[in-house]
Amino acid sequence: MSDKTITFTIDEVEVKARPGQTIMEAADEAAIYIPRLCSLKGLSPFGACRVCTVLVNGRPQSSCTQPAAPGIVVENASERLHDIRQDIVEMLFVEGNHFCMFCEKSGNCELQAMGYRLGMMEPKYPRLWPRRELDASHPDIFIDRDRCILCARCIRASREQDGKHILGFLGRGPHKRVTPDSSDGLVQTDAAVADAAVAACPVGSLMRKRVGFGIPIGQRKYDHRPIGSDIESGAEVPDERK
Amino acid sequence: MDETLKKAVEEICQARGNDAGAMMDIVRQVQARFRGVSEEAIDLIAAQCHVPRVDVAGVVSFYAFLSTASKGQVVIRLCDDVIDRMYGAVAIAEAFSHELGIEMGQTTPDGKITLEWAPCMGLSDQAPAALVNDVPVTHLSTDKARHLIQSLRRYMDPSRLVERLGDGNNAHELVGAMVMNNVRKVGPVIFAPLGPGEAMKKALAMSPAEVIRDVKTARLRGRGGAGFPTGIKWEFTRAAAGSKKYVLCNADEGEPGTFKDRVILTEQPDLLAEGMAIAGYAIGADEGILYLRAEYAYLRRFLEQVLQRRREAGLLGKDVCGKKGFNFDIRIQMGAGAYICGEETSLISSCEGTRGDPKNRPPFPAQKGYRGCPTVVNNVETFCCAARVLEKGAGWFAQLGSPGSAGTKLLSISGDCLRPGVYEVEFGIKLTEVLRMAGGQEAQAVVVGGPSGQIVSAADFERPICYDHLATGGSLMIFGPQRDVLEIVEHFLDFFIEESCGYCTPCRVGNVLMKERVARIRSGKGELADLGYLERLGQTIKTASRCGLGQTSPNPMLSTLRKFRSAYDSRLVQQAGPFQSAFDIQAALAQAKEVQGRASVLFSGERHHR
Amino acid sequence: MPGEKANPKAPANVTAGKKPAKAAGVQKKAASAAAPKTQPLEMVQPAAAAAKPKPKIATVSMAGCFGCHMSLLDIDERILKLVELVEFNKSPIDDIKVFTSRCAIGLLEGGCCTDENVHNLQEFRKHCDILVSVGDCATMGGVPAMRNMITLKECLDEAYQNGPTVYNPKNLMPNDPEIPLILDRVYPCHEVVKIDYLLPGCPPSADTLYAAITALLFGEPLKLPYELIKYD
């Protein structure tokens, strides 16, 4: 690395970063996993889910948006942060209607995998059971808002990778929801089944039709290895879509 | 295709150069003209401005004053602030509903009048209050509410509802409001007179670096609540790369119980304009934007005239005050009803014509703000203080107040007191002294800094008001011994739930969960373990939320857990058993009883199963 | 060991290092727990010493599909060992209808969707030292909770009156007093009575169930491998 290399620590382990890298990017390259949901390699950082919250010199920051800086002391794998991340993941579970037992994404779902990794048996919070609308208007893709975690990965992937804008957000607060770029369902947009937007969904919300349950139990992505294992094993920084 | 709509939308967009950056103005104008921004209008705007229609729809759905559904010709927004509730807002809502034959949130079948709740509109010292279109109506009673509807039915003219004009510039022909300033204590910084250009001339005689030095020497800190040193903010912005820079004034005074900026805008707009121009000179900006909350739209024409007068006097525009090469002008950007836009990066998003989501930091506005350019965002009162620093000198300013908190502070005082209104006090004043001035000595609790601040009890009344002790952006709400602290907490949580932008998980979901558990405790079904649950939940929301809204929304709950513990303890189930106290079998069976017409054999409803 | 559970090298959730409970803590804990526990099972002390009579287990299936009971039977030959260790009391396995003695462990399958379920749950809480919600229906409502987003009336109308496959010329709604009354929604068991442990899964695998039950019986720290905790 050049003399511009930034050196800092994550949980007392020295980590190097290039200027412009975020804490998360530097951690990934150092085979240190920081849990995350709304972050996806190749998309602009968003900072919405807050699962990747770390303490930077004692101050909470989302590591997907926070630049690495010389000498910073980052706390990641502490009990306190584990509890906060578990709380956040549990919030996402109770906010929507997540029925893992019949979800096509089960086993390949990042939210579910994060629940496993963080030791969630069942959220400590009461489920809110919101009534949300399904959009099955498109011949090849459906939007199941019950499962949406508002991470905006589809929205960003569509704009940044597909060169489209098939989706956006409507409403605010608990009423916030993903909506297609039309007043009449996803079918009225130029969404296509091969869009990066579809592959970017971490949960079973934006899904291809007619491919459910394609992979047998036992061979799914997170059946045997926790989410983040690939980063920890020092493998190539993963793209969760693959 | 509605040709009238098409033509109008095209005109509105073209008048702004089909610039999506002016989206707030565009949608506001379409809303005003057609009482709503219909799906069709959204399509037209999107086509005209070359942006995705979903982005236009996203903006319309974000702001409370905008709607896709058509609203009434007149919209009555009744203030849902906790103070207004204390003073009978619910009875007034009932009177409105009864008189109109509709519920809150509905529009009369003839499409004439819409009735809504709205969060604090900056009139807590003259509660209960409402906005009828842009016209504020204060000190409502059920009788007045009935007369108001009768007048509207007859004339459909909100301006006829102004019974008498308020004090000061509220009586100005361009304001014409029944709002009262209620300035109870005048101090040397904000409410002292200022000759035209007096502060600016002194500033322009110095170099920008010297101006910044003076603001730093004066130890001026932001008056909006966060308290960041103003001089340092200006210095960062000045040092940031870029030839185009902006000065943004945050007049989105949305913190419930705060109304002091309204009074500054009414009485001291020149002082504000001088402060903004001085900031522009200091950082090298030629454009200032005054972001005015939609609730204060009734002040807009007046403020436009003030700006125009200043342009004519050479105090804005080209070569300001004769200073060659210093050009600076101010324009007004209207908001559309969103508390979150008082957060500085949300305010920038809104100015840029998008949803009022906060931005990721870094980059900070001083580096990359409005339209990607270095931007200073300060509160109305902060700019006024800065102007006074330059007029009277940094030393003069720094000797006011307390060591860590120089100068004076405007307090907006409301609630259970004899003299609600605006007080300019020196920092360091004890809360007891403030309560004495306002005639609120009976207070059980004082909300310092609004819902995002803290709720303190008598044990804290001897503490001083300043950045290091009882910090406040200006809101002081007083609650007498008859008030229920948990009701206040629950009300504030309702406020945060509605005003959260929904961007990040902890704030979007966590506030809903906090409210559920506080309500459970209030209903007498909470258990001791619920207090630990709330404490952990509150800390997670504070720690993990993305912006100041979520980082502070647990404060009312957390501060009362400490200072008013008995309000919680006394409502807990005293001897919790092996069954869940919160589970109510009769409530769970209510629907079945209705549908099936029989009662439970196992749970007759008479015996308490425990 | 603080921080152990967050160690990314050992993310298998159930190895989390929580403080072991005191010997007498189990029963007391059961009565004071307000929120469902998500901690591992290792804190449980032996339900019975070797010399004493066999500890008793009760089971029930409420708003569930009996799949969790089937999964319990899937422990294959280990069932012989289990029968050596415990005695079943009220349970569909032995068809004992009412509690005849106090039980060490109650295994709950299914969510709570009728007044009868509520009654059953309360009986289990009264008669069992430790209650375990077994499976997704018991822990979160499961498939029956799909109705939780709609009102009971809409639900019954769809089932008996307006549904596309309904043939009901007399427009009757089943309403015999013998039929339990349906609650407004399906409740997870821990929202009705206090529950000591939660085991998600649809169903939890036989290995998961066997490991959990034996751990509860022996008070051993349960270190379920990553593969054994699943929500599906």
Image (cartoon, coloured by chain):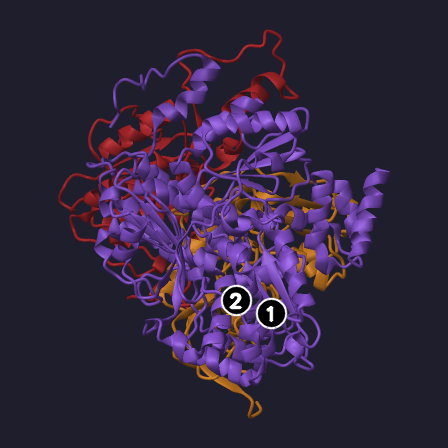
Which residue in the protein does label 1 denote? B247
What's the colour of chain C in the image? red
Q: Residue at x 76, y 58 (%)?
A: A164
CB within 8 Å, label 1 to label 2: yes
What's the colour of chain A in the image? orange
Label 2 crowd bin: few (<14), some (14–19), many (20+), radius 10 Å: many
C41 with respect to A68 (left or right): left
Q: Of helix, strand and loop, which one carries label 2?
A: strand
x and y percentages locating residue A141 in the rendered image: 71, 47
Q: Amino acid at mark 1?
A: Val
Q: Which quarter of the figure has residue B50?
A: bottom right
| First reached walking from the N terminus: tag 1 or tag 2 | 1
Q: Which quarter of the figure has residue B417?
A: top left
Considering depth in this image, is B321 or B94 the residue closer to the camera? Answer: B321
Extreme residue toward the top, this view: C170
Considering depth in this image, is B175 or B150 the residue closer to the camera? Answer: B175
B68 with respect to A105 (left or right): right
Considering depth in this image, is B464 or A144 the residue closer to the camera? Answer: B464
Q: Residue at x 32, y 37 (%)?
A: B522
x and y percentages locating residue A130 in the rendered image: 53, 39
The answer to whether residue A110 shows anywhere in this view is: no
Badge 1 and badge 2 both on one subunit = yes
Which residue in the protein does label 2 denote? B378
Chain whose colour in the figure is purple: B
B289 with respect to A61 (left or right): right
x and y percentages locating residue A193 in the rendered image: 74, 52
Q: Of helix, strand and loop, which one carries label 1?
A: strand
Q: Amino acid at mark 2?
A: Asn
Asked if B159 appears above or below B607 in the picture, the reply is below
Label 1 crowd bin: few (<14), some (14–19), many (20+), radius 10 Å: many
